[in-house]
Amino acid sequence: MKNTLRTLVFNGQVSLTIANTTGMVNDAIRYHMLSASSAKILGKALSAMTFMSACLKNSKGEISLSVQNGGECGDIAVSGNKELHMRGYIGNPFAEGDEENCFAENSALTIIRDDGYNRPFVGSCAWQTGGVDDSFEEYFHISEQLPTRIRTVVEIGENGQCNFAGVIALQLLPFADEEALAMTANTPLEEILQKLKTTPVERLVGDNFDADISVWEGGLALYQCNCSREYLKKVLVTIGKADFNKIVEEDGAVKVHCHYCNSDYTFTKEDEEEIFGK
Ligand SMILES: [Zn+2]
């Protein structure tokens, strides 16, 4: 079932994206054994990045977020693609505290967007004290000059599971007029997002917006790592046969750990021929 919807609203001048990311956040909790605080922060970052992944223009497009942070929760990395396969990592999975006090003052957010053409676009901004939503809004303002309102929510229950997570975003297109700007500013995003708890995403959009259904785009956003043994073999080619053999001699095997899904891969002498050829 689709959990993400993207369309145009307000006379086709503003893009609307809504996603229910509850399942994705629960998968992140499972992979990383996250505390409630870490689940909230990584979950909000995954949700915001789901919006950005839905905005990718090319089917081969990919987008990554990294937050360099010396504060309580450590660095954050999230990646996603146009298929809405998302994955993420948080430096300290056991952080305690609010979004507002888990980040050091000089933290920064960097986005790398690869739309599948030419060179990737890289943009960055300072992390905002308000947290994930404010920081993404600032990023769009500073780096892409696109006025954007974004709200994410992650609710963690007593048992440590995510009861609800989602994202709603409105982004003005370059030709948007004053009226569209005012309508965007006046939309009660938090209130609409809360209704996603009990309403399927398509009905939610229909109930709350006069949407242009000719550009209706849906998808199923989920937590999915793209690592695999085959993929890692290609990565190992880049370190070279000599270095591969040196590590095998010293350690008995080349061990690779995927931070996104906590999977371990082991490559031994027996894999050499398959990786590097004869
Ligand atoms: Zn992985």
Image (cartoon, rainbow, N blue to C red):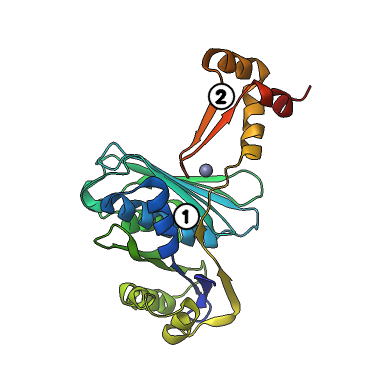
Circle 2 packing at 10 Å, graded few (<14), some (14-19), many (20+), is: some
Residue at figure coordinates x 57%, y 43% from the top left: 227
Residue beneath disc 1:
144
- Mark seen at residue 254: 2
Classify mark 1: helix, strand or loop: helix
Q: Earlier in the sequence, mark 2 or mark 1?
A: 1
Viewer-nearest residue: 30 or 241? 30
Estimate the spatial distance between the alpha carbons at disc 2 and disc 1, rounded to whole Å. 41 Å
| 81 relative to 59 in the view: left or right | left
Screen quadrant of the N terminus: bottom right
Residue 227, visible in the rendered structure: yes
Viewer-nearest residue: 73 or 6? 73
Residue type, numbered disc 2 = Val
Circle 1 packing at 10 Å, graded few (<14), some (14-19), many (20+), is: few
Instruction: Give how far across and how far down residue 206 sits, in percent.
Output: 48, 85
- Looking at the image, residue 112 lies above or below residue 252: below
Instruction: Give how far across and how far down residue 153 sits, in percent.
Output: 33, 64
Classify mark 2: helix, strand or loop: strand
Screen quadrant of the C terminus: top right
- Mark seen at residue 8: none
Residue 140, visible in the rendered structure: no
Residue type, numbered disc 1 = Glu
Residue at figure coordinates x 58%, y 82% from the top left: 213
- Looking at the image, residue 105 lies above or below residue 155: above
Viewer-nearest residue: 211 or 253? 253
Name, please, the residue furthest toward the right. Answer: 278
Instruction: Give how far across and how far down residue 148 sits, in percent.
Output: 41, 64
Residue at figure coordinates x 56%, y 24% from the top left: 254
